[in-house]
Image (spheres, grey):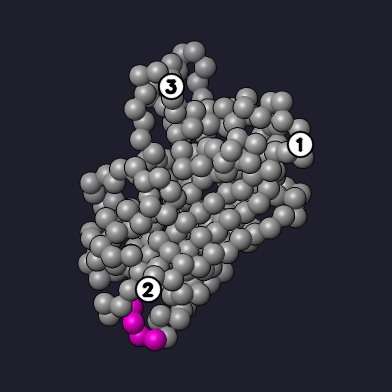
Amino acid sequence: MDRTILLATSNAGKLRDFAGAAAPFNIKIANLPNFSSLPEVVEDGSTFEENARKKAESYSLAVPGEIVLADDSGLEVDALSGAPGIYSARYAARNSQNNDVRNQDVQNNGAPNNVQRSAQPRTIDEANNARVLRELKSVPYEKRTARFVCVLVAARDGKTLATFRGTAEGIILDAPRGKKGFGYDPLFYFPAIQRTFAELDAEEKSRYSHRGAAFRGFLEWYRATSSQQVLGSDAVSNRSRRTSNQQ
């Protein structure tokens, strides 16, 4: 299969992750044409699926007749009652004074606007990781269980075609490890390979990650629907595939 799949995101890390997941199948991942000029979709849903559906349906209207993928993903820490969850991208800024940061699909390569750069410069990722570490400071290793969650939605012409869920189970370390990846990857230790996600390149990470699992679910659906020649029809699949990577 030699095909380009459109992904609606401004997050360079997500583009790398999905490109890594697609590479073994000779599929290329590309952003929507002129994505930066499209109206921003506010992620105000209460679940990963609600946010992913909203993005996929909205952005698919920009490319009539094409399948568009969008995801919402985040980290769920058991000792924090599932936080940061859907607020993962803005966890450090959440509940801060004078802050009205929305949970947008942002690039994690700069400091939050409300952070004084002169005080202690840090990226959004570093600030988010620092908050998680503070909140887990007194939690023993065996109780620092967590999972990454990704809900990936395929849509066309404003309608959801299918949803796919992927998870990856791991442990939150007490200090970052690795320089690759993004987000909470340096803290997320995957016991099966005894490394953090930040110690893996994009293609290797996709074998174990939540996005890799969700993308493989999409690929299975995509191949089936392609063979049935329904990709160009008005048929809408409400199937939701759930896949997970265990410790």
Q: Earlier in the sequence, mark 1 or mark 2?
A: 1
Tags 3 and 1 touching, CB below 8 Å? no
The residue singled out by tag 2 in the image is: 237
**Between 59 and 50, which is closer to the camera in this rendering?**
50
Give the x, y percent position of residue 40: 27, 44
52 up-or-down from 175: above or below: below
**Between 169 and 11, which is closer to the camera in this rendering?**
169
Give the x, y percent position of residue 102: 35, 35
x 59%, y 31%: residue? 132
x 50%, y 54%: residue? 150
Tags 3 and 2 touching, CB below 8 Å? no
The residue singled out by tag 1 in the image is: 141
**Between 136 and 25, which is closer to the camera in this rendering?**
136
Distance Cα–Cα, label 3 vs label 2: 41 Å
The residue singled out by tag 3 in the image is: 96
Which residues, given as a range, are shown in magenta? 228-232
Can I make out residue 56 in this image? yes
Which quarter of the image is occupied by the C terminus?
bottom right
Give the x, y percent position of residue 236: 33, 74
Distance Cα–Cα, label 3 vs label 1: 28 Å
Kind of element beneath mark 1: helix
Q: Amino acid at mark 1?
A: Tyr
Kind of element beneath mark 3: loop
x 51%, y 25%: residue? 122
Kind of element beneath mark 2: loop
Distance Cα–Cα, label 1 vs label 2: 42 Å
- Residue 30 placement: quadrant: bottom left
Number of other residues with Cα within 10 Å of mark 3, as a class: few under 14, some 14 to 19, many 20 or more? few
x 23%, y 60%: residue? 61
Q: Earlier in the sequence, mark 3 or mark 2?
A: 3
Number of other residues with Cα within 10 Å of mark 1, as a class: few under 14, some 14 to 19, many 20 or more? few
